Amino acid sequence: MSQPFRKAAHKLKRLARNAIADSSWNIYRGDRVVVTRGRDRGQTGVVREVDRERSLVYVTGVNLVKKHARGDGETPGQIVAREAALRYSSVALADPANGHPVRVTRMFLDDGTKVRVSRGRLASGSVIPMPGEAMGRRTVRATGRGPADAASEVAARTSREATGKTFLEVFGGGSSES
């Protein structure tokens, strides 16, 4: 086996081993998190960026490292502090009620909206609101018939009045006896 192929295979294996399923990903850009491991343990901050492929999060004001920035003709070189990536497993969502690091479970409210609820030893059991950036991707789960749903007889009559055919005749290909 050639060395470039071996390196590529090793890289793919490492990515697959560290990958976290999308269904179990609970941290989004804009969430308030608490660092649970490392030299910055206990610090809180807001998630600035999420890298799901490598299971990394960037938190504002946490895990600062010094980088040397090269100067150009007008400005001299300088040392800049910036946030380095943290592993997804090294941070936990902060409980909105008391600020403690908590785990998350998913629940559906009566109106069908999916919410995150804090759980764990120090959790208050309150709903953790989704940040504004992530709300655009959320859909509402159907909970059955609601006040805005039309009865099947009304829908069939409306469809027949508009097109002269029933819903099944238009889309299903079948015929109906009127």
Image (cartoon, grey):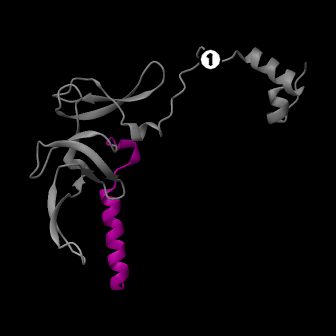
Name the quadrant containing residue 131.
top left
Could you tell me residue 71's position as x and y percent?
21, 74
Could you tell me residue 125's position as x and y percent?
25, 23
Magenta residues (range): 1-27
Report the label total. Answer: 1
Asked if residue 44 lies in the magenta stretch, the reply is no
Q: Quadrant of the N terminus?
A: bottom left
Asked if residue 10 lies in the magenta stretch, the reply is yes
* In the rendered image, the vertical position of residue 101 relative to residue 97, given as above or below: below
* In the rendered image, the vertical position of residue 144 relative to residue 13, given as above or below: above
Could you tell me residue 96's position as x and y percent?
24, 28
Mark 1 Cα-neighbour bin, 10 Å: few <14, some 14–19, many ≥20: few
Front in this rendered view, residue 45 or 90: 45
Name the quadrant containing residue 45.
top left
Q: Quadrant of the C terminus?
A: top right
The amino acid type found where label 1 is placed reads Ala
Q: Which residue is at a point 40% across and 41% down the rendered structure image? A: 133
Label 1 SS: loop
Front in this rendered view, residue 177 or 152: 152
Q: Which residue is at a point 40% across and 47% down the rendered structure image? A: 22
Secondary structure character of the magenta stretch overall: helix
Would you say 65 lies left or right of 57 here? left
Q: Which residue is at a point 47% across and 36% down the rendered structure image? A: 138
Could you tell me residue 47's position as x and y percent?
28, 46
* In the rendered image, the vertical position of residue 6 relative to residue 130, given as above or below: below
Front in this rendered view, residue 144 or 129: 129
Name the quadrant containing residue 84.
bottom left
Q: Which residue is at a point 62% across and 17% down the rendered structure image? A: 148
Q: Residue furthest front?
A: 74
Judging by the rendered image, the residue that carries numbered circle 1 is 148
Would you say 108 lies left or right of 20 here? right
